[in-house]
Image: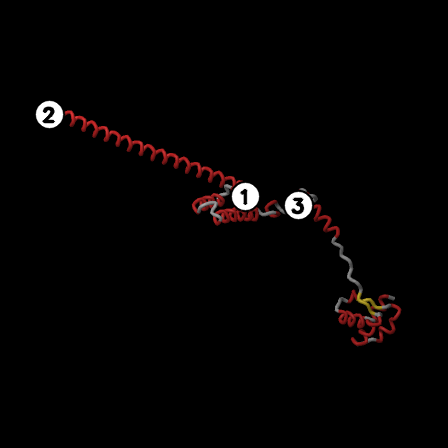
Amino acid sequence: MGYVINNTLRLQKRLASSVLKCGKNKVWLDPNETNEIANANSRQNIRKLIKDGLIIRKPVAVHSRARVRKNAIARRKGRHTGTGKRKGTANARMPEKVLWMRRIRVLRRLLKKYRESKKIDRHLYHQLYRKAKGNEFKNKRVLMEYIHKKKAEKSRSKQLSDQAEARRIKVREAKKRRELRHVQKREELMKTYAKEEEAAKAK
């Protein structure tokens, strides 16, 4: 019977799908009103039948994503990702290049931020930039530790050089004072000798 209905109402089904803007499989024709539907041979008649409820657009079939969501949550926890579930190589699944790009961008962003905030000077920036490119820093923490170490070394060497400079200045001033004392002593001795000589001549 279904075949007969489909065969006789093929035109009506096509017109209805065009009017309802859906596929032919989504069009439902009332099986109790086949004669009335068969008489409808224009879009206008079809629209009237749709209005009367003899022709209906079937609802969209449910395509649930609940299972997909559940699986996705499980995968985030690390389930269903064992060796049996993997198709590509480790490099195909998560390329080394992508990991490298992520890491180097993080490091370069940090270096740029430190340079702009005057935490490091341009010489140290360049040195660290080259080292980062040479794969010397595993992550941001290692780079930050290295920067702190370098800055501590620099401040220590500056402190030591300042101390050495202060010592040199102190020694220089002491030497000057000593020389001045020697000169003064010599002058005093010369004056006493001159007085003694004058006294001897006066006698």
Q: Name the residue rendered at 68%, 42% in the picture.
A: 82
Q: Return the residue at label 3.
A: 86
**Residue 142 point in image, percent of width and height:** 53, 40
Q: Image quarter for residue 201? A: top left
Q: Which mark is residue 140?
A: 1
Residue plotted at (23% across, 30% down):
184
C-alpha gap between disc 3 and disc 1: 30 Å
Instruction: From the viewer's perspective, tell me whether residue 14 is left or right of residue 130.
Output: right
Q: Which residue is farthest front?
A: 203
Q: At label 3, which amino acid type do we have?
A: Arg
Q: Nearer the viewer, residue 139 or 183?
A: 183
Whether label 1 touches label 2, CB < 8 Å: no
80 or 87: nearer the eye? 80
Q: Mark on residue 202?
A: 2
Q: Earlier in the sequence, mark 1 or mark 2?
A: 1
- Tell me the element at label 3: loop
Residue shown at 58% from the left, 47% from the top: 95
Q: Is 84 situated above or below 56? A: above
Q: Give the residue type that dot 1 points to.
A: Lys
Number of other residues with Cα within 10 Å of mark 2, as a class: few under 14, some 14 to 19, many 20 or more: few
Q: Nearer the viewer, mark 1 or mark 2?
A: 2
Helix, strand or loop for disc 2: helix
| C-alpha distance separating marks 1 and 2 | 92 Å
Q: Position of residue 34 (x, y in %)?
A: 87, 71
Secondary structure of the residue carrying tag 1 is: helix
* First-in-chain label (3 vs 1): 3
